[in-house]
Amino acid sequence: MKTVILAGGYGTRLSEETGIKPKPMVEIGGMPMLWHIMKIYSARGFNDFVICLGYKGHVVKEFFSTYALRTSDVTFDLAAGTMQVHRYGCEPWRVTLVETGEHTMTGGRIKRAAPHLGEGTFLLTYGDGVSDVDLHALLRYHRESDALVTLTAVQPPGRFGAFNLAEGQTLIRHFREKTRGDGAWINGGFFVVETAALEYIADDATVWEAEPLTRLAHDGRLAAYRHEGFWQNMDTLRDKVYLEELWASGRAPWKIWT
């Protein structure tokens, strides 16, 4: 089954990093966010990727063009002009990189990737979010529904600590750091999509999260899989620092691979 990753956006709120690279190539623990996302899917047995490129797509191409070499043991015989691979150290990934246009919207990127998807079901996610979502449970949930698209619904953590303070009191009796926001569920990506849903996408200007999902919901063909575990996007420098801290601690919840 194909996994489509949207990796063409500008990442304007991460301008400290994205002036020279697309947001999915911003590194966490020395490896691009895109790599972390692919490792999540690969750990569940999904190894066939279609990556939608846009802004500075050449950076993604350059990464994969040398990835196998950088992860393998090799001997270069410079006099003979040969290279011998002793240990092939990379994952069993098949990666298709599709130029979907620098200014194309998310829906348009998916539509442009259609020739590489075949018929039936594919997985889809954004290039800036990680999670410990059970992809097989998500897929089962989708197949048991009548939906053309199933999204993973998440409750992002609040950005501030919360506490209870009774009337007239000055001492805090209960404090909670990083609360679950206001309880609202949001689109966390990690979609399952039937190719028939691509008919809801008009052209390059179509935003996937706008008209297509709105119409799918109106038609009763959009389902939500509730994920109450870890989910975090990388929208700002603060998010990047948080993810870096989790990775450095050895307790990164999205690291479901060994």
Image: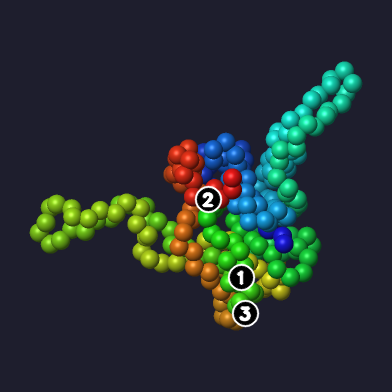
How many numbered discs, if any?
A: 3
Kindly identify the residue that appears in the image at 66 percent across and 62 percent down. 123
Kindly identify the residue that appears in the image at 59 percent across and 61 percent down. 135
User: From the viewer's perspective, is 174 left or right of 185?
Assistant: left
Residue extending furthest toward the bottom: 219
Residue indicated by mark 2: 254
Residue 217 image position (x, y, % from top left) = 56, 77
Kindly identify the residue that appears in the image at 80 percent across and 32 percent down. 85
> What label does residue 146 carry, if any?
3
For discs 3 and 2, the disc positioned in front in the rendered view:
2
Residue 181 image position (x, y, % from top left) = 37, 60
Visible in this render: residue 96? yes
Report crowding for label 3: few under 14, some 14 to 19, many 20 or more residues within 10 A (C-alpha). few
User: How are the colours assigned in the image?
Assistant: rainbow
> What label does residue 140 carry, if any?
1
Q: Amino acid at mark 2?
A: Trp
Name which of mark 1 and mark 3 comes first in the sequence: 1
Name which of mark 1 and mark 2 comes first in the sequence: 1
Kindly identify the residue that appears in the image at 12 percent across and 52 percent down. 170
**Contact? badges 3 and 2 (CB < 8 Å):** no
SS of the residue under disc 1: helix
Report crowding for label 1: few under 14, some 14 to 19, many 20 or more residues within 10 A (C-alpha). few
Name which of mark 3 and mark 2 comes first in the sequence: 3
Can you say which quadrant of the picture contains the N terminus?
Answer: bottom right
User: From the viewer's perspective, is 24 left or right of 158?
Assistant: right
Residue extending furthest toward the right: 80
- Which corner quadrant of the image does residue 221 belong to? bottom right
